[in-house]
Image (tube, rainbow, N blue to C red):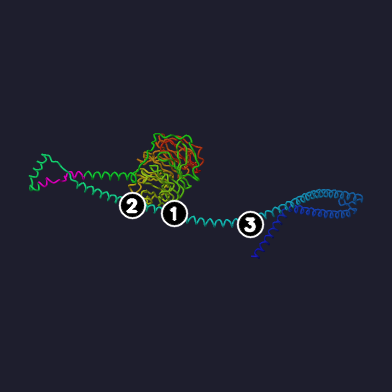
Amino acid sequence: MAERGGGGWKRHVLRQLQRRDRAQKARFRDLVQAYNKLLEKSCLLSTYKLQADSLDLQMGLSARSALEPVDSAGGEVLDSAQVLERLKRNYEGHIGQLQRINVELTCEMIERNTLLEAKETALVEQRGRLASVSEQHSNLEAVHRQLKDQVEELTHKNSAVKADYDTLREHYRHQEMEFRRAAERELELLRSVMRMKVEAAEHRNEKNERVKQARLSRELKKATRRPVGIEIEAGEGKAEEQKMSGGAVPERESREKLWRRPFRSASATSMTLTRYVDAFKGLFDFRMKRGNSVSSSSVDHYCCLPSCVAACLPSTVSDAKAAHLSEINAIKFSPNSGMVATGGADRLIKLWSVAGGRLEHTQTLEGATGGITNLDFDPSGCHVLGASYNNVAQLWKIGDKKCREILTGHADKVTAAKFRSTRHQAVTGSRDRTVKEWDLCKGLSGSRTINVFSYCNDIACCDTVIVSGHHDKTIRFWDSREPGCTQVIPVEGKVTSLSVSPDQMHLLSCSRDNALKVIDLRMHNIRQVFRAEGFKCGSDWTKAVFSPDKSYALVGSADGTLFLWNMETGSLEKSLPGVHRSSVNAVAWGPSGMYIGSVDQCQKLVLWR
């Protein structure tokens, strides 16, 4: 390790020297080029000198030749004065040429000196900058080392925190498993307690029945022992005598004995028995009926629900709330329109009072094991059924904050949960390609499982028919009295929601082809298709609904706008933009027709009227 570390710093020093060498060469490259050009000029000057020497030599030779008396042109002998004059002119020409060259070289030398001085000035500046950059580099190296130490320290801390997180996560997983086991044990204990109570009640009823039978038998015995006197009129006595004379006549003693002793009339006894039995049966039946009216689960008592004659078109925002901590997926009005329930990805179901057009939070239903995807009230408005991401549907009773029933059996996210005609029957749909019917009196066991070939995004319930909308762009109809699918209606997009009209004659579907379709449930055909410019289905769980009087269809768009279509004319009646700033996931229309609720992906709940 020591040798490896020694070789590392040597290579580091070598790289630093090479980097500095490259930087120094880059800074002095222009100066070196100028110096090389200067050397070239000096070489050129020496060449000029050599040329001048050769010229002098040639001139010397020409002078010697000029000293000769013979002219090369005419063969005449020239005078020495003419030769000197000629030489003088040649020298003067060469001197002028050399002077011009000297002037050019002097100018170039001056330029080179000026350039050299500028380069020297630049070199000084570059050295100053190099010194400052070196100082900055040293500071940055120190900061780098400090940051590197901090990174290493944070890495160690992060590793420790990650280890703690993994430990806590494992502990949380174990605790969650223990919680689920405890919840299952609690449910089992609750069922066992209920069974024990039922058995105890049956045992007490049997004991009470035996006591009542014994009391009745004692009363009957007392009634049979009580003597009853009968006065016989003359006509009746004669008739009796005639009857008795027609048969075997007993002896006189026995007749006298018979007429003398008091006896219980058969008619009177039978009347007494009938009267006591009827009285006892009436009392017993009354008590049984009264007990059934209180505790029997087969009789539902529903409150009076408001009827909607004509729904009011929404025009203004009555109230708006930041209802949840995350995305809101579901909204539903209670049957009496006095309450609205919302459910979101924060695993909470919140109940809001809508009295006076204001939203007031009244209760939070806790205990959901996953994000809420769908909600529904039972016909009495006393129970709430919610579907969740955690593969289950859960049942709450309004007033109790804890979950009362968990419907398990799905293998994937439960996307829809609806009550049927009573609160004891429910239907759920899931992404595990199944639709389940539930008898809530039996608890966790589903009474029927329907296997489908595609994800189920929403369901709707009629009297005996279940309608399911699927990811494969189809709507399927299932009859509770038949094992298979009775009808399939294809649509042009993935089905996101289904809504049955109050008279159960039409079905409203929303799909990802940005259209609403009205289906006639008697003929099983598409009656109307609603489209509008600007309407876009924002998600696979966007919900659309009928108005309570079935005059309008309502849905929310991806840009936060609400769209209403007129069922009679088929045209867009109204759009409500500007309130929601994100995609509207679900809408609901109160059964009274006065209020509309809408929720979006940015935790916002809006009440319209």
Please identify, in this view, whether the residue under mark 2 or under mark 3 is nearer the observer.
Answer: 2
Residue placed furthest toward the front: 260
Task: Look at the image and tell me in which quarter the N terminus lies.
Answer: bottom right
Question: Pointer 3: what residue?
Answer: 149
Query: What is the distance, in whole Å, between disc 3 and disc 1 at their CAs?
Result: 45 Å
Question: Pointer 2: what residue?
Answer: 200
Question: Pointer 1: what residue?
Answer: 180
Q: Main secondary structure of the magenta part?
A: helix
**Residue type highlighted by circle 1:** Arg
Along the line of sight, which residue is nearer the eye, 123 or 203?
A: 203
Return the disc, 1 or 2, that comes first in the chain's sequence: 1
Position of residue 344 relative to residue 49, above or below, is above
Range of the magenta residues? 256-273
CA neighbours of label 2 inside 10 A, class few (<14), some (14 to 19), many (20+)? few
The total of numbered circles placed on residues is 3
Q: In the image, is residue 269 part of the stretch drawn in magenta?
A: yes
- Secondary element under disc 3, as helix, strand or loop, is helix
- Tell me if 448 is positioned left or right of 29 in this view: left
Please identify, in this view, whether the residue under mark 1 or under mark 2 is nearer the observer.
Answer: 2
**Residue 517 is drawn in which quadrant?**
top left
Residue drawn at x 86%, y 52% as measured from the top left? 72
Return the disc, 2 or 3, that comes first in the chain's sequence: 3
Query: What is the distance, in whole Å, between disc 1 and disc 2 at their CAs?
Result: 29 Å
**Residue 590 is drawn in which quadrant?**
top left
